[in-house]
Image (cartoon, grey):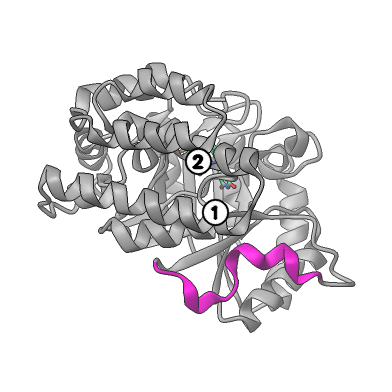
């Protein structure tokens, strides 16, 4: 089985991914948060900063883009390929209206003809492997069925499906029934993504979809970075886990601190990490409420020390953090 760390704009940046790979075992690859707004006539390499250089990744990385411009995509593929990336991912899942209302992210799913027109140009002009990360639809859960007919006409490397619509964002029921129908139709290999918040949830899904070999872990791995090692049945003591979280946190904090002297930016980035990872500790959800109002570095450091000394959360507590601690934006 293959496990992939999902991309999270504002959380799983290069520093986070590389520290994650150094301290937490079991993840086979990571997808980077999307790159957008590349001017195909005049490439600005700062747009690619998060994924370059390619040989620094501690987890094999797949860069991601969001675009509705075929020339831009061909150019992104060319730049990334020149830096050593042979597989890139097309984001057709982002639900935020700022993007989706401009036919970007999942906003393109109601327009299969537009996707065909773009794929015609892209696949005839690039050799780079392209996978797609998508949802059931933007407004309606049946949109992906029409889009799948288009996907099946092109050499798409892989299709990652989050079985919700864009308007659901990240909450409400996932449609496993529709996911099952879609894997029956897809020619490309399918990866499942959605709501795997602990090991037993993975086992349930794996029983329901025995043909699926590839799983993308999102919020579940951000809350509990040992989710991948649990799924792979690597046995690690609680003490080892606690020390690894402390070392991960220390590396992240120092590296971000080195990059920015702006206190609010540093604390903002660390809070984004704890928004999820506080759920790894028993009572961590309540601790996070205290962290939210923390505005100086010394009290932040004290907070992190206290939090990481708490007992590790049980699966039930992790599920509870998922259900009550996360606002699911
Ligand atoms: C704050 C936030 C940022 C995200 N950024 C991206 C992104 O850049 N690219 C992407 O494909 N998905 C992005 N996602 C979606 C996640 O990668 C993932 O598909 C989603 O959380 C569902 O998986 P999960 O239920 O395992 O968390 C983001 C989600 C959140 C909540």
From the Cβ of disc 1, is ligand 1 less than 8 Å away? no
Secondary structure predominantly adopted by residues drawn in magenta: helix
Label 1, on which residue? 256
Residue 133 position, x and y percent, is 54, 50
User: Looking at the picture, does residue 181 appear above or below residue 210?
Assistant: above
Residue at 27% x, 37% y: name it.
205
In the image, 292 versus 52, the foreground residue is 292
Kindly indicate the quadrant of the structure image that contains residue 267. top right
Residue 118 included in the magenta stretch of the image = no
Residue at 38% x, 48% y: name it.
249
Kindly indicate the quadrant of the structure image that contains residue 44. bottom right
Circle 2: element type: helix
| Quadrant including the N terminus | bottom left
Residue 75 falls left or right of residue 218: right
Q: Are marks 2 and 1 in contact (CB under 8 Å)?
A: yes
Residue at 50% x, 50% y: name it.
12
Q: Residues within 10 Å of mark 2 (few under 14, many from 20)?
A: some
Q: Is residue 311 visible?
A: yes
- Disc nearer the start of the sequence (2/1): 1
User: Looking at the picture, does residue 44 appear above or below residue 17?
Assistant: below
| Quadrant including the C terminus | top right
Q: Residues within 10 Å of mark 1 (few under 14, many from 20)?
A: some
Residue 197 falls left or right of residue 257: left
Magenta span: 44-58
Residue 232 falls left or right of residue 174: left
Residue 75 position, x and y percent, is 76, 72
Circle 1: element type: helix
Residue 218 position, x and y percent, is 42, 42
Residue 310 falls left or right of residue 163: left
Q: Is residue 231 visible?
A: no
Label 2, on which residue? 270
């Amino acid at each position: 089985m293959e496990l992939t760390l999902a991309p999270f704009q504002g959380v799983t940046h290069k520093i986070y991914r590389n520290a994650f790979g150094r301290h937490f075992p079991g993840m086979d690859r990571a997808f980077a948060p999307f790159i957008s707004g590349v001017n195909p006539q005049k490439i600005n390499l700062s747009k690619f900063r998060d994924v370059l250089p390619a040989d620094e990744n501690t987890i094999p990385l797949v860069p991601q883009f969001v675009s509705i411009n075929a020339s831009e995509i061909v150019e992104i593929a060319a730049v990334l390929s020149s830096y050593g990336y042979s597989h890139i991912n097309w984001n057709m899942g982002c639900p935020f209206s700022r993007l989706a209302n401009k036919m970007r992210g999942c906003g393109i799913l109601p327009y299969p003809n537009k996707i065909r027109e773009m794929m015609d140009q892209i696949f005839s002009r690039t050799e780079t492997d392209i996978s797609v990360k998508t949802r059931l639809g933007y407004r309606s859960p049946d949109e992906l069925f029409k889009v799948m007919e288009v996907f099946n006409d092109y050499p798409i490397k892989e299709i990652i499906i989050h079985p919700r619509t864009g308007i659901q964002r990240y909450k409400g029921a996932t449609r496993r029934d529709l996911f099952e129908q879609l894997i029956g139709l897809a020619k490309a290999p399918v990866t499942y993504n959605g709501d795997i918040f602990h090991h037993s949830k993975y086992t349930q899904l794996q029983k329901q979809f025995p043909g699926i070999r590839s799983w993308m872990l999102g919020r579940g791995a951000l809350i509990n970075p040992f989710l991948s090692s649990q799924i792979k049945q690597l046995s690690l003591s609680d003490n080892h886990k606690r020390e690894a979280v402390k070392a991960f946190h220390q590396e992240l904090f120092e590296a971000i601190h080195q990059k920015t002297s702006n206190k609010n930016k540093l604390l903002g980035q660390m809070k984004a990490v704890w928004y999820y990872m506080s759920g790894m500790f028993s009572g961590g959800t309540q601790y996070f409420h205290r962290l939210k109002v923390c505005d100086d570095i010394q009290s932040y450091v004290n907070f992190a020390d206290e939090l990481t000394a708490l007992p590790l959360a049980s699966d039930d507590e992790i599920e509870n953090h998922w259900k009550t601690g996360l606002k699911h934006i």
